[in-house]
Image (cartoon, grey):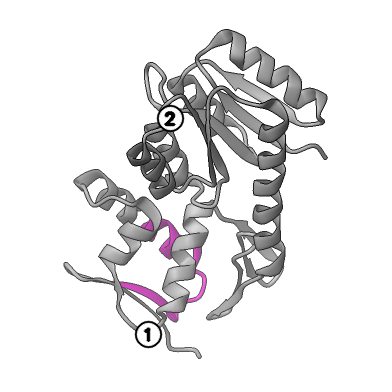
Amino acid sequence: MNEKILLVEDNDTLGYILKEYLEMKGFEVDLAMDGAEGLKRFQKSPFDLCILDVMMPEMDGFELAKEMKTTNIELPIIFLTAKALKVDVLKGFNIGADDYIIKPIDEEELVARIKAVLRRSQSIKETVHLTYEVGNYQFDFTNQKLFLGDEVKMLTEKEAKLLKLLCEYKGRLLPRQKVLKSLWNNNDYFTRRSMDVFISRLRKYLSKDEHIQIKNVYGSGFIMTDSAQ
């Protein structure tokens, strides 16, 4: 199956040229003309890689990447920009970019970099397969699945990452700050409320084993325990 790429570029001419060239090279490409449209398309469909222009109306590439990373922290991202300042390049990498290409763009170089980023991403997925026992449940983190006998619950990526942290800290305090930094990269009121919602979801998913508890230690964090083990 061809890799699916989200290309977000507000320059109509450049956007269509890159879309056609990448499709000619075998990629499936979805083109959005600004950051807000790019976010909507990202939320509706999964992508193997995103290519984001930095300077765009509505929402710039940096802000768009931050939003994307809150949903899929491992999503490969390549930035395109006319800004060659070191501070901007570093900002892109600090957000979690896999590559940063300065305009004007050489199409052959872009394809080579896309393939390199995709190889690294696929290699990480293939070499790491993590599973955990949570009471009577089996948690397949790699495939984001929670098993209870013959029942299977598909988790979102953020739910899976949160449950993974709880498993790694099982029987110990998982600090709220670690969760916020690892999954949301933010600590405002709304992200804290969002985190509490995700904790509630996991409690519900694990509720068929009465021995599993996710306790809220006020102001400090969470402790997941399993007295059956």
Nearer to me, 228 or 75: 75
Question: Relative to residue 2, is residue 155 drawn left or right?
Answer: left
Residue drawn at (47%, 18%) of the image: 34
Res. 61 mark: 2
How busy is the neighbourhood of tag 1: few (under 14 within 10 Å), some, or many (20 plus)? Answer: some
| Marks 2 & 1, CB-CB < 8 Å contact | no
Q: Nearer the viewer, mark 2 or mark 1?
A: 2
User: What residue appears at the point 66 percent right and 13 percent down from the top-left corner?
Assistant: 16
Amino acid on which the number 1 mark rests in the picture:
Gly
Which residue corresponds to mark 1?
171
Is label 2 in a helix, a strand or a loop?
helix
Residue furthest to the left: 219
Residue 75 in view, yes or no: yes
Residue numbers of the magenta segment: 198-215
Q: Is residue 93 magenta?
A: no
Is 162 located above or below residue 35 in the figure?
below
Residue lying at the far top of the rendered structure: 13
Q: Residue 182's spot in the image, x, y percent?
A: 38, 60
In the displayed structure, 10 sits above or below 29; it is above
